[in-house]
Structure formats: structure tokens, C-alpha cells
Image (tube, rainbow, N blue to C red):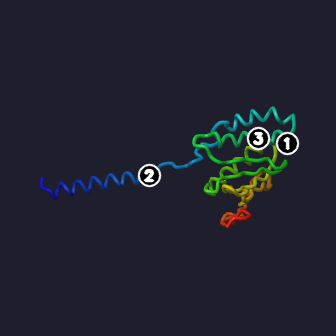
Amino acid sequence: MNKNTIGVLAVCAIGLGLAGWRHYSLHQNRDILKNFTHWPPSSREVHNSMQHYHAASPAGAMKHFAQLITMRYREHNPPLAVLIRYKNPTYLKLECPARMAPWNMNRLALNLWRESRNDLKLNVTVGIYRTYIGAKPFLIGTLVPVQSGSATVASINYTGLNTVPRFAPPPGAP
């Protein structure tokens, strides 16, 4: 074999290796929320735990539900900085990190709404908030339940998705 043939074979081998690596990286599942409903505590565990709280107090049940769902994301490996807060009997506040993609916020909000319907027997509104370090949460959208015939559906209305909150400097800063 001459040098040109060896060079061509080496370039072809490198090209095939790069093409295979690109194909693998494009088709690799990078979903950070893959099977998130099965993360502990799973939907079934939350449902079973909520059976004890219904009789005591609805407010206690809502707070316990919010703590369990928050624990699902915070104690997962890798942890997600997601927080669910109980505001009133018909409103849950979903706080997501600022860098989370909007479609993942949708998935979290829809799952929170479905689980609250199943476990709390309430049709709640879910406020979707973006959180920034050092600033209060910023409302970017709302999941609102809509009665449509016999089936209950929800609508997500985004109002502040493209808006970035302005941070005021602390008093006395230069």
C-alpha cells in the first residue's frame, strides 16, 4: 500500500467515527424529567399518603401535598430547584429555575394539576413562576382549569415568558 491509500483510509475512518458520534449525540435522550412521575415519592405513594390528611384538614392536606411533590424534585439525583407552595384552597404556586425550558415547566404544571385533582379532589389553578437568585419569583404563566363538556381540561396562558425582571440595585449601591 502506498502513502496516499493509507491517508485516504485514515480520513475515511475518522469521518465515519465523527459521523457515528454525531448520530449518537443527536439521538441520545437528554430529557431531564424522564419518568419524573415515578421519582420517589411516586404518584401512587403521594396518593396513599394523602388519604390520611383528607379527614383532618383541607389546608393541611394541601400543604402536605406541596411538600411531597417538592421533595420529589429536590431529593432526586441530580436535584431540581423546583418548589411548590400552597397559597389558598384553589391555587398552587409552582416555582421553577429561570433556566428551565418552558416545555418542562408545562409538564411540571400539568402533572401538578393532575395529581392535585386525583389526590386532593380539587381543580386548582397553578401559577408558574420563574425564580432568579436574589429576587422574588416572577409570574410567567398560569394553568387554569376549563370545564369542557364532561371532561375537565386545562389551559396554560403565558404572559411573562419573554419578560425578564429588572433588578434594582440595593439602596446605597454605587
Q: Quadrant of residue 121?
A: top right
* Residue at the (72%, 55%) spot, across then down: 128
Residue for badge 2: 25
Could you tell me the amino acid type at mark 2?
A: Ser
Q: Which residue in the structure is indicated by mark 3?
A: 65
Location of the C terminus by quadrant is bottom right
Q: Amino acid at mark 3?
A: Phe
Looking at the picture, tell me which residue is in the foreground, 77 or 47.
Answer: 77
Report the amino acid beneath label 1: Ala
Q: Is residue 143 left or right of residue 104?
A: right
The image position of residue 95, as x and y in percent, is 70, 52
Q: Say above or below: 160 vs 51.
A: below
For disc 1, the marked residue is 59
- Residue 9 x, y percent position in the rendering: 22, 54
State which tag comes first along the sequence, 1 or 2: 2
Q: Viewer-proximal residue, 133 or 39?
A: 133
Category of crowding for the residue at label 1, using alpha-carbon neighbours closer than 10 angstroms: few (below 14), some (14–19), many (at least 20): some
Q: Residue at x 80, y 51 (%)?
A: 91
3 or 1: tag closer to the N-terminus: 1
- Distance of mark 3 from mark 1, alpha carbons? 10 Å
The reply to whether dot 1 and dot 2 touch (C-beta < 8 Å) is: no
Real-space CA distance between mark 1 and mark 2, rounded to the nearest whole angstrom: 47 Å
Where 140 falls versus 46 (above or below)?
below
In the rendered image, which quarter is residue 43 located in?
top right
Instruction: Give the label, 1 or 2, closer to the camera.
Output: 1
Q: Position of residue 152 (x, y in %)?
A: 77, 51
Left or right of residue 136, residue 4 in this image? left
- Secondary-structure class at tag 2: helix
